[in-house]
Amino acid sequence: ASIEHCTKLLSNMLQSPEELRNEAYCQLIKQLTENPSLESCTKGWQLMCVFLATFPPGENLEPYLGGFFVKHLNNEDIPTIVVEYATFCLRKLQNINQLGARREMPTAVEIESTIRREFASIRVFFLDGKYVTIPADAWTTAGQFALKVSNMLGIRTKSP
């Protein structure tokens, strides 16, 4: 049920203006600040990861969001799982700022792997029935994926 809820929220966010997206990030920050419930906090960080896989924060919000993540890296009182999510989010903030908002919704597999902070294993099937498995995450572009497939197959392109 949480993936379905997440999908509905993301669908609305992708169609929303930047101001509403920023508000969603701010509400998450508010939920995560001094939240005494580790379960609630973990779910909030998971949603933050999924937001960062779908749309970037606005230009004015980005430094504050990055600062929020950094604040959770160097505090001994913060649970390890929160530090791990903050570290992941800080890395992915740079990715989503470079890529921009997605044009399409992330798939359930992308959402689930993002929540786990892992790569998804994507099978690429060939006409002879064989396949290769390629790791990818929600920030992997089609060009990067194609390069991974060609590298795995030993196909090298010539530079112009």
Image: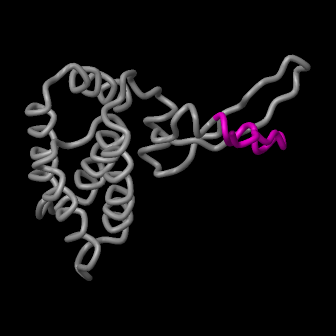
Q: Residue at x 24, y 69 (%)?
A: 70
Expressed as whole percent of the image width and height from the top left, the position of residue 134 reads 69, 40
Identify the image's colour scheme: rainbow, by chain, secondary structure or one colour: one colour
Q: Is residue 30 above or below residue 12?
A: below
The quadrant the N terminus occupies is top left
Q: Residue at x 32, y 60 (%)?
A: 90
**Foreground of the two, 63 or 87:** 63
User: In which quarter of the view is residue 74 placed?
Assistant: bottom left
Q: Residue at x 86, y 17 (%)?
A: 127
Q: For the magenta stretch, what is the residue range?
A: 146-160
Q: Is residue 35 above or below residue 107?
A: below
Number of marks = 0
The residue sitting at the front extreme is 160
Q: Residue at x 9, y 52 (%)?
A: 30
Expressed as whole percent of the image width and height from the top left, the position of residue 22 reads 12, 40
The residue sitting at the right extreme is 128
Q: Is residue 150 magenta?
A: yes
Side of 91 relative to 16 (left or right): right
User: In which quarter of the view is residue 72 placed?
Assistant: bottom left
User: In which quarter of the view is residue 4 placed?
Assistant: top left
The residue sitting at the bottom extreme is 76
The quadrant the C terminus occupies is top right
Expressed as whole percent of the image width and height from the top left, the position of residue 131 reads 82, 30
Expressed as whole percent of the image width and height from the top left, the position of residue 89 reads 33, 55
Side of 135 relative to 41 (left or right): right
Q: Is residue 22 magenta?
A: no
Side of 152 relative to 139 (left or right): right
